[in-house]
Image (cartoon, rainbow, N blue to C red):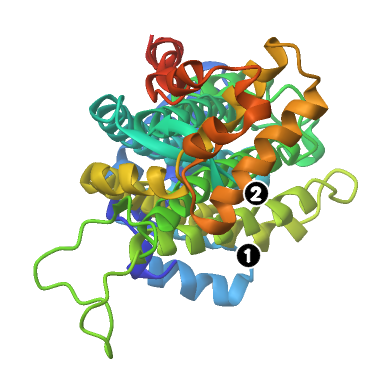
Amino acid sequence: MIPRYSRPEMTAIWEPETRFRIWFEIEAHAAAAMAEIGMVPKASAQAIWDKGSQAKFNVARIDEIEAVTKHDVIAFLTHLAEFIGPDARFVHQGMTSSDVLDTCFNVQLVRASDLIIADIDRVLAALKTRALEHKNTITIGRSHGIHAEPTTFGVKLAYAYAEFARCRERMVAAKKEVSTCAISGAVGTFANIDPRVEKYVAAKLGLTAEPVSTQVIPRDRHAMYFATLGVVASSMERLAIEIRHMQRTEVLEAEEYFSPGQKGSSAMPHKRNPVLTENVTGLARMVRAYALPAMENVALWHERDISHSSVERMIGPDATITLDFALNRLAGVVEKLVVYPANMKKNLDKLGGLHNSQRVLLALTQAGASREDAYALVQRNAMKTWEHGADFLTELKADKEVVAKVPASALEQMFDLGYHTKHVETIFKRVFG
């Protein structure tokens, strides 16, 4: 992943040094478990742990060995033996490479999950704060991009909060999905290693033993994980696009914070562009793109092939690092979002009260008009407002067929904004408790 869209804590999870340290821990825990059940000498298991713990693994040296062996795990084990000495013969007893690779990959995904869940918590906190701040800030709701009926900006943010709360639940489930360990040997039969070793290693790493592994941990788990990352990314994009729309010059109901000294365009000094949410939109596309190859990894040959390996070396770091960065960028946008209530009210008034059309329609049906006739009465007056800029209430009051069923005084009462926001409190209680 390129540094521009990376954060150090997440990047560190995928560094070679971290990977080799996890590999060592898997091997050392396995040796300790074997020592407990009498498969290897206890003194040798202790030596493996002590000497390996103090070792500083040399990535360049491992690469040098791999250039000859053409096998990354063997290269690592050869390098590890350079630190441990004769006791290294008890390392990797009865294990296969996938025991190390798959268990390590899941450890990394679990650690990445913890950071992503924390990122979502930051987004949730920002959304809750701003939603409560603008709980009663009236704005026009839009369907198809066209004025519909009034809502509040707080409700818009509450909607996003509820969505990201679901994202958090999905990430917790995704973390659980990949929190498994496989130390089952060639083709997963435990022929040369005791199942108790797997249970021991799993417990030490905070994982659970994979019920059945065919030399590899089943990739449907990973497909679900990366699909979840894609769903989170889609929720990010939905909110980012909402903000981008609100920042358009013709709308300008909210905009990204524009810091002192910031420049919007190399050519036009007046520009203030929604660059952060545009960036989030682009990054969301990338995260979603990683879900498909994860799904294609599910179908491996027989008990194992390595067609998934090259894919996961890319999508593991790229998807988690990208999502981590984008979530924090989005949280910052929400925290500093500049909101313009006056512009919201100005935009709401642009169509001369047309947002009350449904209420008038319902009143006419309650007064005895058929729905078809009521719709026609309301629409013909609405179109005068739409096409000629007339005032909707004025047109309705001048329509004899309308006032014959609904008096002018009653019509006036239907143009109260409070009617549209009377259940905001109910929505907030549902969302925030």
Q: What's under tag 1, amino acid-wise? A: His
Q: Is residue 225 above or below residue 57?
A: above
Residue at label 2?
97
Marks 2 and 1 sit apart, C-alpha to C-alpha, by 9 Å
**Front in this rendered view, residue 415 or 323:** 415
Measured as percent of width and height from the top left, residue 9 is found at 30, 49
Asked which quadrant contains residue 126, the reply is: top left
Measured as percent of width and height from the top left, residue 102 is found at 62, 43
Side (left or right) of 16 relative to 333: right
**Residues at circles 2 and 1 in contact by the CB criterion of under 8 Å:** yes
Q: Is residue 144 above or below residue 220?
A: below
**Residue shown at 42% from the left, 58% from the top:** 244
Measured as percent of width and height from the top left, residue 351 is found at 47, 47
Asked which quadrant contains residue 181, the reply is: top right
**Residue shown at 25% from the left, 29% from the top:** 129
**Front in this rendered view, residue 311 or 98:** 311
Give the SS element for disc 1. loop
- For residue 71, the mark is 1
Give the SS element for disc 2. helix
Q: Earlier in the sequence, mark 2 or mark 1?
A: 1
Measured as percent of width and height from the top left, residue 307 is found at 77, 60
Image quarter hosting the C terminus = top left
Side (left or right) of 410 relative to 129: right
Residue 206 appears in the rendering = yes
